Every structure is written in structure tokens, then in C-alpha cells.
Image (tube, grey):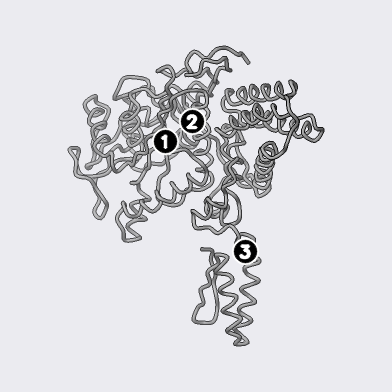
């Protein structure tokens, strides 16, 4: 690992050169932004048709670690995140619920923002709702049309991928043998179905639409991100990041759109986070291993433990999410918090010990070297835990002195500027989400047992007991629904 002065960063100290793995080149490369000291970064945000799940948050935590690290290295970060608040699923679900798409998505945007706060995700500089940027999308489609990259069919506008010879360069698909002129109307499809994709979808009866110069309709998903990225960040971005499943078709199509329109390179570094697995399996609703953040919170898991676990595995490695790994993350956070409290609370003898001061400097250097190496958070954390162990030992032996506290705490602050788990505010955050921290002890089986007890009380017509049990469960966030036939169902609030 070479150590050299950063030419591009805002910092003037000698630090390790930052390197990122770029999906486009397939290589880990020195990170040099276009404008010295400034990073223009685009993040694909959620499609707000439901609560975001823990797999989504793996990517959002990675993006937060990325921006925090760049900031800690002195860069001014300008990050844009979109909110996809119109798409096939949103249209279907809002229609089924009998509400406007605005009303339908507002609820999930609010929930998403609350979840972000619970995980200490810093707000991006721009949060852009797709439905507030329809004009920008229409304008970009018109630019593409003027350059001959589009055609229309039955009121929809499609991107002609045959006219963009570089198509496939990010996802490395071969489009040579592909039939030209075949189209796909869906936003999500696989590599085998690479086709001309919809930029603008013609209005269908009953669907929400916008009246525009390119006809009545609504945008396709891929044009949203391209239009908003170009609007806020310019023709060439430094970093575009997202989950690995967005590589194709979403990011491939964003490249085709923006590069065809501007004639310039769209993105200098493509960073993709790997999947999150639950018990070694891909998370899916059909497997029943699909977890939202709120479900985890109401089962007693702390926001700090979840953030720590998601941040601790380097983003390009698959992350296996299990109850044990969450437990491990919770104890790691405890250990770090206890360590900092101990240094702040204990009385140490005057003076300082050169060995500890040196130890802290080494940890600082190793932490930064881990982070600079394509955000190797595991390596960075190892440096922190080594320091914690050595400093604890020194304190146990009475070798830790008053003057050692500041340099060690400085390392912990540097760590926390990125990991953001040291503040003991989990209970506060859960109650902000309306989740009471003291009701977590009940497992499903325990609830079932208490409910059965209440059923027995009802059967013997002991309604005082039955009501008391109902109230006690309500206090712990369990709601009972009695049915007319004497049965009962329960759910968590
Ligand atoms: Zn996107």
C-alpha cells in the first residue's frame, strides 16, 4: 500500500491514497474527483411503494459510510438521492388503496426518512422526488429524440439501444446478436431480455399521467435518475452508487441516456454494494425471511446494532444477516461505548505514556488505511478493537495516564464520525418511532402463551382477568382482535 500526499483531497496531511473499486473498469483505482476537493455523488434511492427492507438499508448504510469517509478526508460532498415516487407498483397499489399516488407515497417517504434518522444516515444535499422533476425528464427525452436515439410507438417513447454502440459496457452484456427494435415496457427485466426500453409510457385509462409536449403519460424509471443526476451534478459525476442488482438494466440505461445526450462520460466511479443474505439465503417475501427495519426494532434490536452490523462488512462482500450476527454487533457497540465511558470516568495518574500515544497514532493510521482501501470497514474496525484491547489492558495495569485520554478519544471520534454508533440514544430513537423499548422481551411464542391464558379466562367468564391481560399486552405493543366466534388474533403495534 503506497502512502503519499493526497493531491485531490481537501486535506493537506499525508494520508493514504483513497482507492475505490469501479464496476466499469473492474479494477480498484485511485480516487481522483473531477474538481479537486469536491465529490459529486449520486445515490439511487428507494422506490417508495412499501417500507424499505433491511437489504435496501445495507446499501444506504454503505452510501452513508462512503460520504462520511470522504468528508472526514476533507472533501466537500454533494450527494443527490432520488425518491422514485411513480412506477408500476406505486400506480397499482395506490389505485388498490383508492388514494392518489402523492398520498400513497408520502406515507412511505416519511417512514423512510424516519428509518434513516434511526440509523444515523446523514441527509444527502439534495433529495429529489421523481414527480417533481417531470419537466427535466421530458427535456432529456427531447434531447435524445433530437439526436436520433428514440422512437415512438403507440404514444410511448423508447430508447433505441442499437444507436448507442457502447450499450452493455457496465454490465458486460453482449448485445451483438440481439434483435433490434424489440421493446420492453417494464422497468425491471433481466440481461437476457435486453431490449429498447421505455423512456416515456403512454397514458393508460385510470392511470395517473402528466400532460407534456411528448404526449400524455408518465416517465420510465431509468430516465428519472439520469435527468436528476445531470440537473444537480453536471454532465459527469464522480461517484454513482447503488445495490449490485441495479447494474442492469437501471445503471446501464442511465449511461445510455446521459452519454447519448451529453456526449460525455457520465460517471467516473461506479460503486455497487453486494447483496444482504438472511441465514445464507437471498431475502424474499416468498421465503418469509423478508425483514423491514421496523420489524427488527419491534423485536428488540437496537438501531446502533443494526447500523454497526451493516457497516462492518465491506460493501463488496455479501453480508449474512442472522440473529447471532446482530447479537454480536450489539455487544461490539456496547464494548466500544463502555470503553469511551471508562476513559471519561476513571481518574488516571498525571503525565502521559509514550507507548499509548504511539499506539493511538498507529490505530489512527491503520483505521484510515482500511477505509482508504475501497472502504474496507472490517480492516478499519480491527484497528479500533486492537486499540480498545491494548488501552483497556494498560488501564487494568495502571499504566494509562491522564495525558493518554485525549489521543485515544481522538481516535474514537474519528471512528465515530464514520460509524456513528457511540451515542447511547437507541431508546430515544425507538420511542421517536413509536416503539417502546421495554416491550421487546415478548417473543411470538410468549405472546401466544399469554393470549391462550386470556382465552382460558374468557372461557371461565373471568372478564376482569381477561381485560387485565389485554391491557398488559397493549402496554407491550400487542393488539388483540376478538372475533365474533370467540377466537382471537393478535398483532404488534
Ligand atoms: Zn437510479
- The mark that comes first in sequence, 3 or 1, is 1
Residue 124, which numbered label?
Answer: 1
Kindly give the residue lying farthest to the front in the view shown: 350
In the rendered image, which quarter is residue 380 located in? top right
Is ligand 1 closer than 8 angstroms to the Cβ of mark 1?
Answer: no
Q: Which residue is disc 2 drawn over?
A: 67
User: Where's the N terminus, which quadrant?
Assistant: top right
Q: CA distance from mark 2 to mark 1?
A: 9 Å
Residue 69, which numbered label?
Answer: none
Q: Which residue is disc 3 drawn over?
A: 444
Q: CA distance from mark 3 to mark 1?
A: 38 Å
- The mark that comes first in sequence, 2 or 3, is 2
User: Which residue is at 49% across, 58% downward?
Assistant: 434
- The mark that comes first in sequence, 2 or 1, is 2
Q: Position of residue 139 (x, y in %)?
A: 23, 32
**Secondary structure state at the residue bearing disc 3:** helix
Residue 388 placement, left or right of 433: right
**Local crowd size for mark 1, using a 10 Å CA cut-off: few (<14), some (14–19), many (≥20):** some
In this rendering, the answer to whether 176 lies above or below 214 is above
Amino acid at each position: 500500500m503506497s502512502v503519499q500526499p493526497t493531491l485531490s483531497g481537501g486535506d493537506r496531511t499525508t494520508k493514504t491514497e483513497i482507492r475505490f473499486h469501479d464496476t466499469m473498469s473492474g479494477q480498484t483505482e485511485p480516487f481522483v474527483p473531477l474538481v479537486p476537493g469536491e465529490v459529486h455523488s449520486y445515490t439511487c434511492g428507494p422506490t417508495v411503494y412499501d417500507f424499505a427492507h433491511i437489504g435496501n438499508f445495507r446499501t444506504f448504510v454503505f452510501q452513508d459510510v462512503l460520504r462520511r469517509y470522504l468528508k472526514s478526508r476533507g472533501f466537500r460532498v454533494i450527494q443527490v438521492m432520488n425518491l422514485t415516487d411513480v412506477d408500476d407498483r406505486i400506480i397499482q397499489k395506490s389505485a388498490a388503496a383508492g388514494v392518489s399516488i402523492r398520498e400513497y407515497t408520502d406515507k412511505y417517504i416519511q417512514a423512510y426518512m424516519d428509518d434513516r434518522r434511526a440509523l444515523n444516515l446523514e441527509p444527502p444535499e439534495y433529495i429529489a422526488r421523481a414527480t417533481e422533476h417531470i419537466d427535466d425528464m421530458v427535456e432529456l427525452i427531447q434531447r435524445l429524440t433530437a439526436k436520433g436515439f428514440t422512437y415512438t410507438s403507440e404514444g410511448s417513447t423508447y430508447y433505441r439501444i442499437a444507436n448507442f454502440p457502447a450499450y452493455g459496457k457496465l454490465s458486460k452484456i453482449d448485445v451483438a446478436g440481439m434483435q433490434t427494435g424489440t421493446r420492453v415496457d417494464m422497468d425491471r427485466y433481466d440481461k437476457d431480455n435486453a431490449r429498447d426500453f421505455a423512456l416515456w409510457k403512454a397514458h393508460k385509462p385510470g392511470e395517473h399521467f402528466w400532460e407534456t409536449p411528448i404526449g400524455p403519460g408518465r416517465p420510465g424509471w431509468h430516465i428519472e435518475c439520469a435527468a436528476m443526476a445531470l440537473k444537480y451534478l453536471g454532465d459527469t459525476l464522480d461517484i454513482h452508487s447503488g445495490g449490485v442488482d441495479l447494474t442492469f438494466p437501471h445503471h446501464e440505461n442511465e449511461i445510455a441516456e446521459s452519454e447519448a445526450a451529453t456526449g460525455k462520460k457520465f460517471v467516473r466511479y461506479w460503486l455497487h454494494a453486494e447483496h444482504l443474505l438472511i441465514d445464507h439465503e437471498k431475502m424474499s417475501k416468498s421465503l418469509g425471511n423478508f425483514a423491514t427495519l421496523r420489524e427488527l426494532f419491534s423485536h428488540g434490536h437496537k438501531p446502533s446494532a443494526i447500523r454497526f452490523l451493516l457497516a462492518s462488512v465491506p460493501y463488496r462482500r455479501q453480508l449474512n444477516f442472522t440473529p447471532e450476527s446482530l447479537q454480536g454487533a450489539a455487544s461490539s457497540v456496547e464494548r466500544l461505548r463502555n470503553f469511551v465511558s471508562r476513559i471519561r470516568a476513571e481518574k488516571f495518574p498525571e503525565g502521559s505514556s509514550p507507548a499509548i500515544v504511539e499506539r493511538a497514532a498507529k490505530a489512527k493510521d491503520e483505521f484510515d488505511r482500511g477505509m482508504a482501501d475501497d472502504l474496507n470497514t472490517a480492516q478499519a474496525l480491527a484497528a479500533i478493537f486492537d486499540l480498545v484491547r491494548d488501552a483497556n489492558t494498560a488501564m487494568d495495569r495502571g499504566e494509562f495516564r491522564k495525558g493518554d485520554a485525549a489521543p485515544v478519544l481522538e481516535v474514537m471520534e474519528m471512528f465515530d464520525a464514520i460509524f456513528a454508533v457511540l451515542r447511547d440514544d437507541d431508546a430515544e430513537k425507538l420511542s421517536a418511532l413509536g416503539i417502546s423499548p421495554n416491550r421487546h422481551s415478548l417473543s411470538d411464542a410468549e405472546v401466544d402463551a399469554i393470549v391462550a391464558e386470556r382465552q382460558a379466562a374468557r372461557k371461565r367468564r373471568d372478564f376482569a382477568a381477561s381485560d387485565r391481560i389485554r391491557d398488559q399486552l397493549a402496554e407491550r405493543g400487542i393488539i388483540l382482535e376478538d372475533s365474533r366466534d370467540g377466537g382471537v388474533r393478535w398483532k404488534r403495534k
